[in-house]
Amino acid sequence: MPEDNQGDVDSQYGASLDSITRLRRLVYAYYEQHGRDLPWRKTSDPYRILVAEVMLQQTQVDRVVPRYVSFIQRFPDFASLASASSSDVLREWQGMGYNRRALSLQKAATGVIASHGGVLPQDKAALMKLPGVGSYSASAIRAFAFNLPDAFIETNIRTVFIHHFFPEEARVTDAEIMPIVEMAVDRDDPRRWYQALMDYGVMLKQQDNASRRSAHYRPQSGFKGSRRQARGEILRVLLNRGRLSTDDLQAGITEWNVLFEDALGAMVKEGVVKEREGRYGLD
């Protein structure tokens, strides 16, 4: 593990210019030796960055990589994604979970074509108007696609700043972290800075997961027996068998119960599953 600079807390927000400089050196030194080779880091294509950022929401990198590669091969640009059927999009997304993200991404592609001439906007407010793109995702897209120096926080970034600048605090808020994140952004190359910062954070989480001291930390619930599992089973059956009656859908799932009833109702409400005349499908 690189040399530690915990406890460098000589300003209002627990950081000085010197401590920020030392942090950058640590982060870049680690990145030079251990930076991850990820497919979305080999491009600055805004479409591909958008796809990656939506996929990475609540999903671990090792699960995203193969799905990202397959998704980009199947839908290489905004036009191909916007014109695809919902079932084709969900089929490519299968195994990622949180399937409404796939449909939001498709709606975002449609919006980019309809409102922006097929070109992803750089403006943060415009990005946040796209389905599935919140404040964090918009700033990440701006950094990775356009190399713009936005300040933003996600779990690995949070880990770095709590570890180095809040070594004793038990409950650290993002509001406390953000001023230091803003100070630390490498405005000459924010794309590389955030790639390096996230990789450094991954390493720190393996050593001492400081993100657990965040006021925003919420451990993810188990998958088995969860609504997420029920949604995945419903999607699997509909992808394999097409539009089904309620009885046929229930027959295709072992031990159908109220959890599946609730999951199906939510999926219909979200538009992931379409119900017509008592039959359920994805298109």
Image: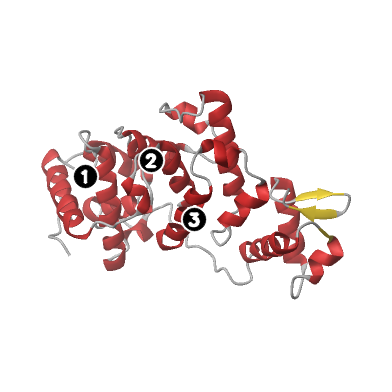
| Residue 246 placement, left or right of 85 | right
Q: Nearer the viewer, residue 231 or 81?
A: 81
Q: Residues within 10 Å of mark 1 (few under 14, many from 20)?
A: some
Tell me: residue 272, above or below residue 120.
below
Mark earlier in primary sequence (1, 3): 1
**Residue carrying label 2:** 140
Mark earlier in primary sequence (2, 3): 3
Secondary structure under tag 2 reads helix
Mark earlier in primary sequence (1, 2): 1
Q: Indicate the position of residue 76 as horizontal and vertical percent values.
A: 49, 44
Q: Indicate the position of residue 125 as horizontal and vertical percent values.
A: 47, 27
**Residue carrying label 3:** 70
Q: Indicate the position of residue 219 as horizontal and vertical percent values.
A: 47, 62
Q: Residues within 10 Å of mark 3 (few under 14, many from 20)?
A: few
The colour scheme applied to this rendered structure is secondary structure
Query: Mark 1 against mark 3, which lies toward the viewer?
Result: 3
Q: Check whether the beta carbons of the residues at disc 2 and disc 3 lie within 8 A of each other.
A: no
